[in-house]
Image (cartoon, rainbow, N blue to C red):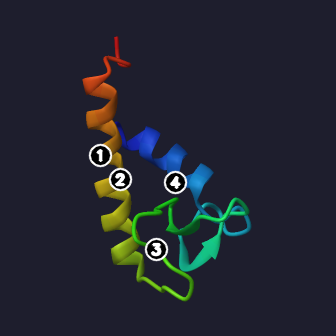
Amino acid sequence: MLPENQLILKQLEGDPKNSGQPLLEAYNDGFGTWTIGWGHTSKVKQGDKITLTQAEKYFQEDVKSWESVVKINNFNK
């Protein structure tokens, strides 16, 4: 994913009250899913806390995972 697209995604998934910065404490997304960082949901539970470095790591892992889904399903044609 291009860096400028990552920035857009971070702004959409981050804290709307703080210029899209990651949320470093787990929160319920309103649909019952615990979320942290920039929309990371894997193995997140109530009370979890992360650092900015961990939020970036999760974000890069999530982007890589979704990029492979897009490639497998040929959404990028």
Q: Which residue is mark 4?
A: 10
Tell which circle, 4 or 1, labels the residue nearer the N-terminal end: 4
Q: Are marks 1 and 2 in contact (CB under 8 Å)?
A: yes
Question: Mark 1 Cα within 10 Å, few/some/many (few <14, many 20+)?
Answer: few
Q: Which mark is residue 44?
A: 3
**Amino acid at dot 2:** Asp
Residue pointed to by mark 1: 65
From the image, which quarter does the C terminus lie in? top left
* Residue 75 versus residue 28 in the image, above or below: above
Depth order, front residue of 43/57: 43
Residue 24 position in % (x across, y down): 52, 79
Q: Which residue is mark 2?
A: 62
Residue drawn where x is 59% and y is 64% of the image: 33
Q: CA distance from mark 1 to mark 3?
A: 17 Å
Q: Amino acid at mark 4?
A: Lys
Q: Circle 4 sits in a helix, a strand or a loop, which is it?
A: helix
Q: Earlier in the sequence, mark 1 or mark 3?
A: 3
For label 4, count other residues whose C-alpha is less than 10 Å away and answer few (under 14), some (14-19) or many (20+): many
Task: Using the rendered view, name the quadrant where residue 19 is placed.
Answer: bottom right
Q: Residues within 10 Å of mark 2 (few under 14, many from 20)?
A: some
* Relative image position of residue 13 (x, y in whole percent): 58, 55
Sooner in the amino-acid sequence: mark 4 or mark 2: 4
State how far apart marks 3 and 4 are (Cα).
18 Å
Q: Which mark is residue 1?
A: none
- What amino acid is found at the position of numbered circle 1 in the picture? Ser
Image: 50 above or below 66: below
Q: CA distance from mark 4 to mark 1?
A: 16 Å
Q: Nearer the viewer, residue 32 or 77?
A: 32
